[in-house]
Image: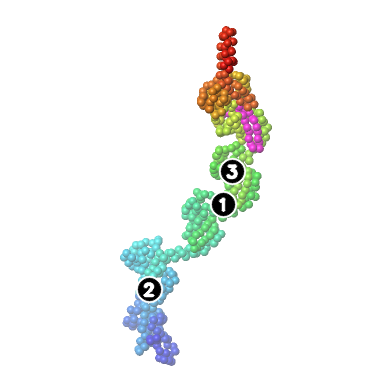
Amino acid sequence: MAERIRMEEALGENDIRLFSRGDTVQGRVVQVAGNEILVDIGYKSEAVLPKEELTPGHEDVQPGQVLEVLITYIDEENGTVYISERQAFFAKKFAELEQAYRTGSPVRGTVVAEVPNAGFQVDLGGIRAFLPASHLGKGISTKFERLRGKALDLKIIEFSRRTRNIVVSRKEWQKDQEERAKDALFASLTPGKVIEGTVKSVVDFGIFVDVGGHDGLVHRTEICWKDIPAPPGKFRPGQKIKVMVLEADRKEERISLSLKRLRPNPWEGIAQRYPVGAKVKGKVVSLTDFGAFVELEEDVEGLIHISELSWTPVKHPKEVVQPGQEVEVVVLAVNEAEHRISLSLRKALPDPWEDVEHRYPKGALVEGTVTNVTDFGAFVELEPGIEGLVHVSELSWERISHPKDVVQPGQKMRAMVLRVDPQNRRISLSLKALQQDPWEEFLEQYSVGSVVSGPVTQIKEFGAFVRITPAVEGLIHVSEISNERIGHPQEVLRLGQEVTAKIIGINEAKRQVRLSIKKLEEDMAQADTEKFISTQPVRETITLRERLRELGMG
């Protein structure tokens, strides 16, 4: 270099150091004289340090004091070296700040001035930097009066040695701190670790828990070992709870937590604790349309299907049990994999259908209460758990439109046992069996040849039905309605019309009666004719008879 002291000038002076402009060296103050300070830097002569080149705030120097200086100029002709402490300071400080900028390391600065409508000037240990107002970050006042002289941790976001422009940000420093805290947090959250957290919020699908500045989720499936549609109401924001870490994904910033895994899975070995057929006790916790759920132990619930609640059919579980009720049940089935237990309440009680054939033999007269009326009949409760059915055909000897025309729910009634089927849990009853058979009454009053009257109840293509008694109807075939040929009974008859006809046939086996209007009219015509003949003289009668014979009527 042009300003480097040539080696040949230093021959014989091995103890003299070689210097270049821009070098930073240490020296000891030898003398303070006026505006210059002489400093021994190991050169053949003392270096000259002008007082204006002292570091700001470091003007009072004393002989013997060690300074760090930068060589600014070498006068080779006169053998004089000029130095600057101020430039050495700035060079060193800028190098430190540039290193902090490149590595993203934090720096500390003090707010010293305000830049109106823009931000603030910050002193970084002798170097001024600009802090934009938008980069103040959170948790601090934006008023200069409160910020003046305040030391802040910052991050350099812009740096230029040439223009000596430095821009800093407290907001970015905070972000870095948060990221470092996250790194440390996620590194510490190893699967299986148990930690304490604070409930932040409760939503339908789970619980958010603050575990050291970051929220983790306890999904509803990880709250307890039983399936629940939403978190229980016992969890509240601000509540301290212990949780187990399932997964901590730093990249996705996702933390999965569990409450239920803080204790063993109660469904493991459940079949051994609740064998099929065992009688156990539990508490009814909820009701649905299809049954009742019973808690056997924490997070273990079994279902009593509605069909297993009672020996008597029920419309809704609330007719038998209520939430909070203690019950004794029998285990029907256990599925450990699917976390299901089927229970029976009725099988924990005596079976009323045992020995039912002896208590209700065929032909026995019984008394009960009508519990339900359907299109096909009426159900009668004979005792708790035992119901019999009176089929619609067994309600009355008369034709009825609907069972409710004869019986109503809640009505007390007597009936006769027709059949008992213990295997299918059925008892057939009869109400009409207690009444006199109207067919027998009919046979006592009427026979073939009897003339009867009644309303037309049905009209079919083949004929019309006429009610003879309240329980017996007769059929007038279309061919027996009139002597004249007709295509359909409706041409002559109408519903409700009162008609008189003669019984021309009775089928006792099928309980059928055949009627004829035509036959009745023929008989009546014959009777009138005979009456007329009987009132004439003999000669005329013979003549009339002959005349009738001639006409084909005799």
- The amino acid pointed to by label 2 is Ser
**Mark 2 secondary-structure assignment:** strand
Is the C terminus in the top left, top right, bottom left or bottom right quadrant?
A: top right
Location of residue 303 (image quadrant): top right
Gap between marks 3 and 1 measured at Cα: 19 Å
Mark 2 in CB contact with mark 3 (< 8 angstroms): no
Counting residues from the N terminus, which is met first, the one under dot 3 or under dot 1?
1
Left or right, 394 with reference to 172: right
Q: Position of residue 205 (x, y in %)?
A: 50, 52
The residue at which mark 2 appears reads as: 160
Q: Position of residue 269 (x, y in %)?
A: 63, 52
- Residue 24 in sight here: yes
Which marked residue is nearer to the observer: mark 3 or mark 1? 3
Tell me, yes or no, if residue 152 can be seen here: no
Number of marks drawn: 3
- How far apart are the alpha carbons under marks 1 and 2? 61 Å
The residue that disc 3 covers is 304
Answer yes or no: do the residues labelled 3 and 1 have beta carbons within 8 Å? no
**In the image, is residue 495 above or below residue 51?**
above
- What's the residue type where badge 1 is placed? Trp
Tell me the quadrant of the picture where the N terminus can be found: bottom left
Position of residue 417 relative to residue 449, above or below, is below
Q: Residue at x 64, y 37 (%)?
A: 424
Is residue 422 shown in magenta? yes
